[in-house]
Image (cartoon, rainbow, N blue to C red):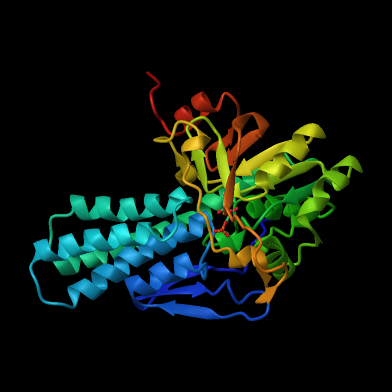
């Protein structure tokens, strides 16, 4: 049985990028209509659209929107191209950690570089390519799901952190893609979702989307995972990633590293599920991955309400890096990459090692 998710997080329609506003979930389901490059920058920055593959597609749509805006103005092609380049760089600066954003924008700009035609045709090509990347994302996630489902033990308890689901991609999800495919084969698996402070993507988004698809899920707070592991309730961990270095070190939502350490201690396999577009081979190891520092309000407040004394010191790194030694495998659309990651990643990316 094939499991299909009803959720489409981002979709290009009538020169508009339509995105599910994730700041409103789970209280309200609202589609935001994004019609300008600036609106897209703000949507990514303010996490109306979030999750590495989803912000990649948002970036690709953003470039198409920028081209549309610029094509309506009079000016030379050179002027158009210069301005488009600046807008592409601006979009890339919306969030620093997820490399899918840079990857998708670079894909769009490469297309522009290879195209020797008029402004109207360039704009049309950018729109077409944005839609192509959008459709490919779902196919890639389904492949990740198929590969991942093969290694899920019967009746397993599976823990995931943050939201690497349909909402973090165009649809179906990476880590939740594995869970969706596994559930289609074996409805006795048990899914556990970490709450994922400070933005609560696990509580707000992962549980919401699994409930939409009728997949039972148990919500736990971030500190509970070791206890559940010690009781034998968790047999496998699968999370997404925002950027994977050439040696397999993987950046994902803050707290992922803690879960990976707990899994290692309890001899539980810890998997990353991510498309190859999340791998940044220009970065040798995880210590070079830029980590986003987010607003301190996210820590001091929950739902607008202050939860700590005035005057406390705060740090709020949005991501951490799980060292490759804690990762049992990286589930990609080309199969499951195993250690030594330097070799398996290079092979998957078709790079000849020197
Ligand atoms: O800050 P967010 O919500 O964009 O962070 C998202 C994550 O960390 C996801 O796990 C990651 O992007 C993988 S999504 C398939």
Residue 284 locus on image (x, y percent): 45, 31
Residue at image coords 81%, 41%: 235
Question: Which residue is nearer to you in this view: 57 or 320?
Answer: 320
Residue 62 locus on image (x, y percent): 35, 66
Residue sticking out furthest to the front: 311
**Is residue 58 at least partly visible in the picture?**
yes
Give residue 353's quadrant in the image: top left
Residue sticking out furthest to the right: 231
Report the quarter where the N terminus lies: bottom right
Q: Is residue 303 above or below residue 329?
A: below
Question: Which residue is nearer to you in this view: 145 or 62?
Answer: 62
Residue 304 locus on image (x, y percent): 65, 77
**Is residue 149 at least partly visible in the picture?**
no
Residue at image coords 73%, 37%: 261
Give residue 40's quadrant in the image: bottom left
Question: Which residue is nearer to you in this view: 316 or 32?
Answer: 316
Residue at image coords 49%, 60%: 54
Q: Is residue 243 above or below residue 74?
A: above
Residue sticking out furthest to the left: 76
Q: In the visual, does 133 lie left or right of 334?
A: left
Report the quarter where the C terminus lies: top left
């Amino acid at each position: 049985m094939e499991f299909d998710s009803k959720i489409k997080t981002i979709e290009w329609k009538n020169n508009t990028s339509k995105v599910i506003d994730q700041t409103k979930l789970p209280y309200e389901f609202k589609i935001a209509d994004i019609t300008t490059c600036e609106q897209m920058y703000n949507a990514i920055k303010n996490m109306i659209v979030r999750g590495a593959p989803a912000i990649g597609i948002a970036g690709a749509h953003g470039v198409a929107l920028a081209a549309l805006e610029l094509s309506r103005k009079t000016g030379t092609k050179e002027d158009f191209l210069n301005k488009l380049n600046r807008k592409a760089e601006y979009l890339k600066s919306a969030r620093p950690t997820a490399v899918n954003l840079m990857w998708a924008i670079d894909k769009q700009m490469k297309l522009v570089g290879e195209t020797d035609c008029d402004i109207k045709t360039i704009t049309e090509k950018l729109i077409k390519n944005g839609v192509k990347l959008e459709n490919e994302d779902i196919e890639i996630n389904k492949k990740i799901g198929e590969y991942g489902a093969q290694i899920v033990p019967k009746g397993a308890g599976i823990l995931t952190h943050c939201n690497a689901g349909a909402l973090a991609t165009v649809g179906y999800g990476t880590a939740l893609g594995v869970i969706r495919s596994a559930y289609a084969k074996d409805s006795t698996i048990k899914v556990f979702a970490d709450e994922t402070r400070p933005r609560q993507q696990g509580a707000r988004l992962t549980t919401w989307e699994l409930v939409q698809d009728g997949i039972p899920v148990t919500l736990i707070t971030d500190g509970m995972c070791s206890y559940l592991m010690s009781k034998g309730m968790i047999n496998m961990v699968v999370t997404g990633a925002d950027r994977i270095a050439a040696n397999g070190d993987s950046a994902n939502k803050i707290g992922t590293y803690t879960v990976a350490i707990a899994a290692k201690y309890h001899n539980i396999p810890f998997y990353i599920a991510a498309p190859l577009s999340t791998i940044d081979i220009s970065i040798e190891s995880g210590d070079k991955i830029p980590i986003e520092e987010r607003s301190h309000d996210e820590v001091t407040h929950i739902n607008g309400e202050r939860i700590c004394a005035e005057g406390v010191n705060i740090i709020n790194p949005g991501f951490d890096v799980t060292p490759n030694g804690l990762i049992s495998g990286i589930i990609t659309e080309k199969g499951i990459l195993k250690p030594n990651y330097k070799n398996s990643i290079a092979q998957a990316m078709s790079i000849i090692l020197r």
